[in-house]
Amino acid sequence: MISKVSAAAARHRHVVLLLGLLVAGVNAAAVGFAPSLGEVLFTPLLLLALAVLILSVIAVGIRPASFVVLPPVPAFATPAPAWKVFFALGFLGPGSASVGALVRSAREGMVSTLDLVFTISWLALLALLVVEAWRGHEMQLRPDGIRHRWVLGSLTVPWEALPTAHVAPGADRPSRLRMTFAEPLLVRRRGLPWSWNALRTDSIDARFLAAAIRHYVGHPEHRAAIGSQAEYRRLLAALAAV
C-alpha cells in the first residue's frame, strides 16, 4: 500500500506539490489575517504534517532495481524519490504558520529582527525542498555518461572517465554509491554537488545501479542506444544473466 502511494506521489509530484503550496498559502493567510481560523486549522495541519513526514521516512527504504526510460533526453533515470515530496509537504505546514505569524506581527507593528530572520530561513529551506522535490529524476545514465543533479549543483561523469562504482561491504541499503575514476580530469563538477565522488541511491537499488554502470563501462558499443525501450530490455536481460 505504501509503495503504491509513494509511486503515485512521485509520478504526480507536480500536482501534489501545487496542492501543498495552495494549502500552505491558505494557512498563512488564515494565521496572518484570521487568527481564529488559523487556530481551527492548526491541529489537522499538524497531524497531516506529521503523517507525511512519517511517510517520507518509510519511503526512503523503497529502492527499486529499475530505471525510468526517458527517450526524449535520451536517458535511463533513477525513479523520482517520493520521500522528497513527502518531506517537502511535511515542512510546508510549519513554514506557512511562520509566514502567517510574521504577517500578523507586521499588522500589529511588532516585527522583530529575529522574527524576520527566522521566517526568511524557513522560506529558504522550503524553497530548497520544494524545488528539489519538483525536479524529480536526479541521476541519469546517458549515451555520453552519467549526470547527477541536485538543486545547488551537478556532477557529470563521461564514460571516457571509466567510472567504477563501489557498494560498501556489508551495506544493506546504502544511500550513496561511491565511485573512482581512471581519468578523474574528465569529471565535471558545478555548483555545490551533493558529493564529489558519489551518486545518491535513496530512490534506486545501489547494486543495480553499480551493475548498470559497470556494464556500460565494459560495453561501449551499447552506450549509443541508452534511453530506448529496446536497450532497456536488453540491459535488464544482460544484468539478470550475470
Image (spheres, rainbow, N blue to C red):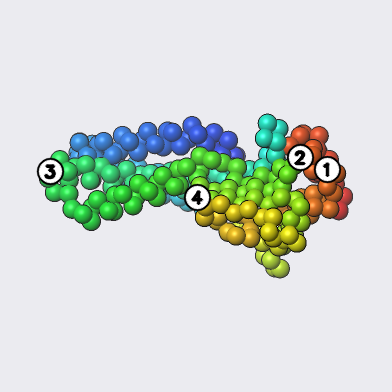
Q: Which mark is residue 242?
A: none
Q: Which residue is rendered at x = 47% and y = 42% of the image?
A: 131
- Badge 2, how many Cα within 10 Å: few under 14, some, many 20+? many
Viewport quadrant of the N terminus: top right
Residue tagged 3: 108
Tell me the SS state at disc 1: helix
Tell me the SS state at disc 3: loop
As drawn, the residue found furthest toward the bottom would be: 169
Cα distance between the residues tagged 1 and 3? 66 Å
Q: Earlier in the sequence, mark 1 or mark 3?
A: 3
As drawn, the residue found furthest toward the left would be: 109
Q: Are marks 2 and 4 in contact (CB under 8 Å)?
A: no
Cα distance between the residues tagged 3 and 4? 37 Å
Cα distance between the residues tagged 2 and 3? 60 Å
> Residue 162: x percent and y percent?
76, 56
Q: Are marks 1 and 2 in contact (CB under 8 Å)?
A: yes
Residue tagged 1: 222
Residue tagged 2: 226
- Name the kind of residue labelled 4 in the image: Leu
Q: Which residue is rendered at x = 38% and y = 44% of the image?
A: 92
- Name the kind of residue labelled 1 in the image: His
- Name the kind of residue labelled 3 in the image: Glu
- Is residue 74 visible in the rendered image? The answer is yes
Residue tagged 4: 152
